Image: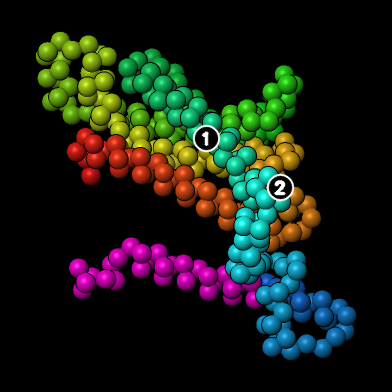
Amino acid sequence: MSGQWYKQQWLAVATMFILLTIIWYLAALILNGNQLIKNLERRQQSWSYSQIISEAYAVKRPALPAPHQVVAEIYKSVFQTKVTSKRSLLYHAQITLNSTLLGFVLGSLLGIAIAIGIVHNRTLEASLMPWVIASQTIPILAIAPIVVVVLGAINLTGLIPKALISMYLSFFPVTIGMVKGLRAADKMHMELMLTYNASARQIFWKLRWFAAQPYLFASLKVAIASSLVGAIVGELPTGAQGGLGSRLLSGSYYGQTVQIWSALLMSALLGSLLVWLVGFTEKRMLARRGGQ
């Protein structure tokens, strides 16, 4: 094991992290340096490369903020700001998380229900499956404003429209994964249960459901990430006062690139945490039935 230290996952992750950080710093130097040079030449001021290098990482409104600027903004808005303050990233993350989880639950239930119907009814498969696939060809940026406007007309605002947009994105991978999983049951076991005159319900709960669980959790990992994206996109057209989407939008309005990147990084961290939680639940559940 000690001779294969270079194969360990943490080392690969750490190497990639260092590589990406170096690329990020170089990109920030190039983009912010060009911005500084243009400003100095417009003012007809002399400049040197050492001056540009020293100032490129301290620009107040940089074209691309350096990693330490983004980390400083996150530290300030997470640890030095009250959670109830609208300047706190945790405050905005909690708002986005609420609609993400509600949309994920609704989307998962809808996806499982559609998959069960498709597997047990050929008419539903022929009529419903093409619409399920076609639904994902429509850009979410086009649907989100329509959902917000239509639901707003019947006084449904706030959490519900964002959750429905999350549900729209998350039900598709669950449907596809569950259809594949429910059909993955061993044919010999199916024939054996039919020999025992087992009902469709008994076959489902004693055979199909267990065969589908690995597929279900794989699709849930995709669905929870899609649900987070849906919640953030749903916050953009609503003009919401809270949420990571509104944080991104306000940063875009006022040219606060550090704020935009800190919200993006917080979104990535939140998404990683949610996917990890689904993976953790998968390991616990599959371990109870003797899986890997």
Judge whether 200 appears above or below 274 on screen.
above
Name the residue at the right extreme: 43
Residue 12 in magenta stretch: yes
Residue on which the image places disc 2? 85
Image point 47% across, 39% down: which residue?
Answer: 224
Residue position marked by numbered label 1 in the rendering? 101
Q: Quadrant of the C terminus?
A: top left
Q: Evaluate whether residue 249 shows in this view.
A: no
Residue 85 falls left or right of residue 6:
right
Q: Tag 1: residue type? A: Leu
Q: What is the x, y in percent for residue 169?
A: 53, 35
Does residue 12 sit above or below 264 in this rendering? below
Residue at figure coordinates x 57%, y 36% from the top left: 98
Residue 64's quadrant in the figure?
bottom right
Q: Main secondary structure of the magenta part?
A: helix
> Within 10 Å of the Cα at label 1, are there few (<14), some (14-19), or many (20+) other Cα atoms?
some
Residue under the image location 70 percent in, 27 percent down = 157
> Which of pointers 2 and 1 indicates the residue nearer the eye?
2
Q: Residues within 10 Å of mark 2 (few under 14, many from 20)?
A: few
Q: Residue at x 79, y 77 (%)?
A: 38
